[in-house]
Image (spheres, rainbow, N blue to C red):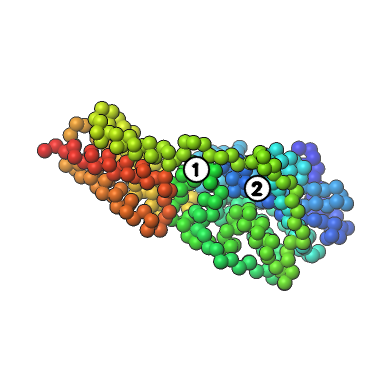
Amino acid sequence: MKKVIFAFLLFCSVGVVSAQHLAHDDIRISLLTADPGEDIYAVFGHSAIRVKIDVLGYDVVFNYGTIDFNQPYFYINFAYGKMWYYLSMSSYERFMSSYMFENRGIREQVFALDSAQTFYMVRFLEKNYLPENRYYFYNFFLDNCATRIRDIIYNVYLDSDIPATFETPCYRELIHRYLRQHPWGRFGIDIALGLPTDQRTNLYEQMFLPDFLFDAFSQTLNSGNPIISETNVLYKADPSNPAQKPPGLITPLIVCSFVLFLALLFMFVQKGAVVFDFILFFSVGLTGLLVVFLWFFTQHVFTANNLNIIWALPTHTAMAFFLFQKRFSHLVGKYFLSTAIIAMLLLFAWVFLPQKLNPSLIPLVVAIALRAYRNSRRVKL
């Protein structure tokens, strides 16, 4: 900790007092890109800025991806979409050791900066690190550790153009590429995120992902010259000990298929069917309430207009209690018949929907349709 404090004081002295005594060639500023990690929060990789001044023995990393777990009402703010992140600073050695411990590769791109650009970035980081400036509201797609660096660099290189790209994947397709080893993470994200996640992206928008930021910078020219002067592999991950482990055997598709198996079984076996139906519809209803909460009662931009509401009707939480009646009123019977029809229509329209629903949900939606139709027959004559 003392080393970090000393480094910060030294940094301030460089930016305010001693910068005039340094040539810009003495200051080396680079982008560090970390490979994806095992945990879901690390699976998309990471970006940070390194500032190195050899003549002063100064080598620190500025990290816009730091969470303040001690902030008041942390979990409430997380659910509400008001997550405070902040710019932190650590020694280069400490940064590297943490990623090497996790066996995550680190690549470095050194920026080709002139004198004015170099000292602008030094002073910008110095000012941004002040306590009153370092905090910001995090948004995974729009404002994160990578987009902050993207905006800084393209403000520094005013005569640069974003490289052309012929690929325009949507946000959902981009994050799916990183979730192949995390089927449950993909399953939960697909349920939580709505239609805005399915809009097409250009390269500038794709740079919310560190890998895309790295690739874009490697192709960017400023007045005809590359903005990257050299690229280095600082640490190459050991392939025999991958950072991302293979997924387990119990996947969302397995679980949803098992639910469908039980739904089919209880079409022929009555004992226990009511309990199964209650758990099914009550759970689906709770999922619907979560969708509604994220859609209407939070500041999460990308959870709005969520078509998962079609199969996860929040009203199921209340209607599930009617299942313990031997016979239903005509109104309850019509409710379950409508549920069955909606579920079947959803299955027929699945591939045509503007929002890509998780395919593992298909067996679950079939189970909902079967059990809802079966229960719609329990009407008082």
Classify mark 2: helix, strand or loop. Answer: loop
Residue under numbered circle 1: 183
Q: Is residue 172 visible?
A: yes
**Horizontal and vertical percent for residue 176?**
52, 50
**Horizontal and vertical percent for residue 159?**
69, 70
**Which quadrant of the rendered structure holds the C terminus?**
top left
Determine the residue positioned at 56% across, 66% down: 166
* Spatial CA span between label 1 and label 2: 19 Å
**Horizontal and vertical percent for residue 206?**
57, 58
Determine the residue positioned at 67% across, 43% down: 239
Q: Is residue 122 left or right of residue 132?
A: right
Determine the residue positioned at 29% across, 52% down: 345
**Horizontal and vertical percent for residue 221?**
70, 68
The image quarter containing residue 217 is bottom right
Q: Nearer the viewer, residue 230 or 302?
A: 230
201 is higher (above) or lower (below) than 279: below
Q: Is residue 293 left or right of residue 123?
A: left
Farthest residue toward the left?
381
Amino acid type indicated by mark 1:
Pro
Q: Mark 1 or mark 2, which has the lower sequence index?
A: 2
Q: Is residue 56 left or right of residue 361?
A: right
Residue under numbered circle 2: 35
Q: Crowdedness of circle 1 by 10 Å Cα count: few (<14), some, many (20+)?
A: some
Amino acid type indicated by mark 2:
Asp
Classify mark 1: helix, strand or loop. Answer: helix
Residue 126's mark? none
